Image (cartoon, rainbow, N blue to C red):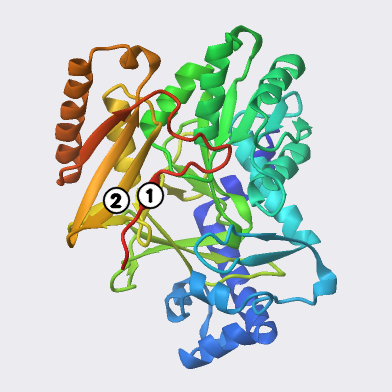
Amino acid sequence: MKYYQETAECMPREELKKLQDEKLVKQIKHVWEHVPYYRKKMEEAGVTPDDIKGTDDLYRLPFTSKADLRDSYPDGLLAVPKSECVRLHSTSGTTGKRVLVYYTRNDIDLWEDCCARALTAAGADENDVCQVAYGYGLFTGGFGLHGGSQKLGCLTIPMSSGNTDRQLQFMADLGTTILCCTPSYAQYLAESMEEKGAGGDIHLKAGVFGAEAWSEEMRKDLEKRLGIKAFDIYGLTELSGPGVAYECEMQQGMHINEDHFYAETIDPNTLEPLPVGREGELVFTSLDKEAFPIIRYRTRDICELSAEPCACGRTFLKMCRPRGRSDDMLIIRGVNVFPSQVETVLLDAGYTSNYQIVVDRVNNTDTFEVLVEMTPEMFSDSLGRITEMEKDLVVRLKDMLGIQAKVRMVTPKSIVRSEGKAVRVIDKRKY
């Protein structure tokens, strides 16, 4: 029997709703009794645990934001004694104070179950060799997929990110079949593999890629260059890490682990809940986390949910790949611009996904420049041909974004490669 068939993934929707209602009621009592920060927010909203009978009452609860998590640093949202915690992870802290997330043994077990489901959906089983090239340490990526891989019985290679030569050597020598890393690092590995002529020694069948935004065009590129089927995985440190949602073999959206996380979408301006199928900001409530329960967390990711039946047999709702973020989207001359839109244009036009967006403000006017890295073949073209490529991309980007960008073709390898999340945007504006 398949791993996922032994879990709630194929549960009838009415049974799942009942399970979610029961878990939510228990969770709200848990945070009311053990997290003063949440209790105060609920009291200010005029809500008590008795008011929450199930998920239909979720709208009555206040939202949790990144600011709440930072304000409660280091342990203001901890719901159990530290003696019951066995691990913590952390966000990067690049935009402010770090968020620390605590885990009990049961929290770790449930998280690894979610990641095992994701790997199973990508075709992994005990016969596979899973190379985990996400970062380890405080970052959740490495540990999450590592635990899920071991739970499935895969031979698990804890490579972490970096040391690309060794990555390729181990892929060849150990027969790696499943690769787990960021999509931008997967592209770097593909690029390095092509340069070294190592493709014939590597026999990957699937990749589980997440932790940063990537497009359908990038998926096609990775599948072609690595000879794999590429699967998306979604997660947030605040919710545990990777494995909140994952793609199945149909690749038509990511199934949300609804027995552990309740998903809703809201209008980011009015904060009103939206029906399934309407695009909005994704909000999650953890249903059974013990150490670090989180209620109505605003992810800032823009996407839509789907209740359409999936041919794989899983009954969980699906979420589309996030189309951008309500907080990180760029507003340039009054126009909303998402980096994923730029990437789509570049890949559709046959360019690589090695690019950077540079935004500045000169004389009170926003400037918008896209640096596009050329392949060696493009670089060998005449200057006139390069100028034509730039002009073509200016037109394509304006058609997609509704705003004109300056495009500058740059030499191969001039954009710094990342072994973790790619740095796609440099915003120099001062507010």
Image location of residue 329, percent across then percent down? 33, 55
Check residue 359 in the rendering and tell me which mark sits there, or answer none: 2
Q: Are marks 1 and 2 in contact (CB under 8 Å)?
A: yes
Q: Residue at x 69, y 38 (%)?
A: 160
Determine crowd level at label 2: few under 14, some 14-19, many 20+ residues with C-alpha closer than 10 A: many
Residue type at mark 2? Val
Looking at numbered disc 1 in the image, what kind of residue is underneath it? Ile
Q: Earlier in the sequence, mark 1 or mark 2?
A: 2
In the foreground, 172 or 428: 428
319 displayed left or right of 313: left
On screen, residue 377 above or below 286 = above
The quadrant of the picture occupied by the C terminus is bottom left
Front one among 108 and 55:
108
Query: Which image quarter: residue 101?
Result: bottom right
Q: Can the viewer see residue 183 in this picture?
A: yes
Q: Nearer the viewer, residue 87 or 159?
A: 159
- In the image, residue 57 lies at what x, y percent? 46, 77
Q: Which residue is mark 1?
A: 426
From where the camera sits, is residue 154 visible? no
- Split into 4 quadrants, where in the image is the N terminus? top right
In space, the residues marked 1 and 2 are separated at their CA atoms by: 6 Å
> In this rendering, is residue 106 above or below 115?
below
In what element is the residue under mark 2?
A: strand
87 with respect to 334 (left or right): right
> Taking 289 as reference, is 85 left or right?
right
